[in-house]
Image (tube, rainbow, N blue to C red):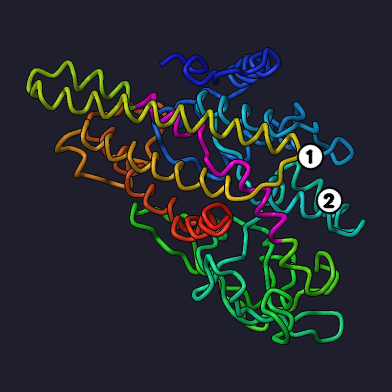
Amino acid sequence: MKPGVDLQRIGESAAARAWRAEVRTFVEAHLPADLARKGALGLKIEKDDYVRWQKILFQHGWFAGAWPEMYGGQGWNLMKQLIFTQESALRNAPMIIPYGVNMVGPVIYTYGSAEQKREHLPAILSSDVWWCQGYSEPGAGSDLASLKTFAQLEGEHYVLNGSKMWTTEAHWADKMHCLVRTTRDGKPQQGISFLLIDMNTPGITVRPIVTIDGIHHTNQTFFDNVRVPVANRVGAEGQGWSIAKFLLGNERTSIADTGPKLRLLRQLKSLHTIFMADPRNSTALKSTLSLGLADLQIQLLTLCNLEAHYVDAWMGGQKMGAEASILKIRGTEILQALSELALQLEGPMAAAHDPADLHLPPTTPLNAAQQASLMGHEYLYGRCWSIFGGTNEIQRNIIARQILSQ
């Protein structure tokens, strides 16, 4: 698959095609070779790798492209954002970690005080401060309104007690943007506030959670009488639910995550070529897997066109509704199907997964077992995509309420 050719959607404008070409040229010119090779092989991207690439983007004004120009961005519209993430992934660039630039940054410049903007926005832009998100709890995942972490007001501080679950990259983070309960009165949504928390504050404990792929991505974070200045609250007390919906709305514009899936499809095509050339594989199996690959390519390119169609509608002023849930479901289903096909193409070696292979130097030639192990990682970690960001079951409930009930 020639990157960018299969991706060019039906009816894409000349301006969009030109922007694709500009992004391709930029990434090819500026992405360090070792990071490109890590991305191409599926090796683990470390914090320093992400920071290095984000700083390169920042130096050229492209890191916070969607931010308004007055805050250091380029004012990119949704289509430019979509094309940038797709083409960057197809050039094997690391993803932009969203917790700072795509999540809390827009919250701060939309709802934050002048002092909060001065303190936090420059450090987000430069990637000198790393953020994590404190939303889910042991008893409050997709149902965030049931969160229990409580912030008791004491003078000029809130005193936090409780815990957050699945806090991705909290072990790397300097700050957390966090939903907490500041009152137990009234409707659950009305008692939630949005706080900015320094992760070095006494009383915070980050406990690692090693997921099924054998990698430390996520954590449980505990708060034991953690004192957070009232000045670190964004917006009014009790406004956290509205702010959270604003943040999630920004997140869901890219929830289909089609760029990395297109890159995985390209990797599968290479695996398929090797599989077809092996005389030990039966004609019947070759036919079955070839049809499976063709079907998944059609599904993914259809998703890309659907995603672009929705983005066009949102740019035209249509309110975002169940469309984001449709993209989330189809995106995760296609990702998991791609990773399952990869295991079939790898054959018996796909059963062996060694997390250490993810940490190999990018200059190391990989043998067949290590390549299969990396595809095994895609399969294992891909299980979580239908859970986080609101489970697919929750997304189907949203679709039922907003579309099927009309």
Amino acid type, mark 2: Tyr
Of pointers 1 and 2, the one earlier in the residue sequence: 1
Figure check: 148 above or below 274: below
x 51%, y 69%: residue:
220
270 over 156 or under it: above or below: above
Query: Which quadrant of the figure has residue 332?
Result: top left
Query: Which residue has dot 1 on it?
Result: 67
Element marked by disc 2: helix
Question: Splitting the image into 4 quarters, where does residue 267 fall?
Answer: top left
Q: In this view, does 251 lie to the left or right of 367?
A: right
- Could you tell me which residue is drawn at 57 percent across and 24 percent down? 87
Q: Give whichever of 220, 255 is nearer the camera.
A: 255
Look at the image and give the residue range highlighted in magenta: 244-267
The answer to whether residue 330 is above or below residue 117 is above
Considering the whole magenta stretch, tell me its main secondary structure: helix
Q: Taking the image as drawn, is residue 168 in sight? A: no
Nearest the viewer among 39 and 78 is: 78
Dot 2: within a 10 Å radius of its alpha carbon, few (fewer than 14), some, or many (20 or more) residues?
some
- Find disc 2 in the rendering and name its residue: 109
Real-space Cα distance between discs 1 and 2? 9 Å
Most distant residue in the right direction: 114
When the figure is inspected, residue 154 is found, relative to residue 56, above or below; the finding is below
Q: Position of residue 63 (x, y in %)?
A: 71, 35
Quadrant in the picture for the N terminus: top left
Q: Is residue 250 magenta?
A: yes
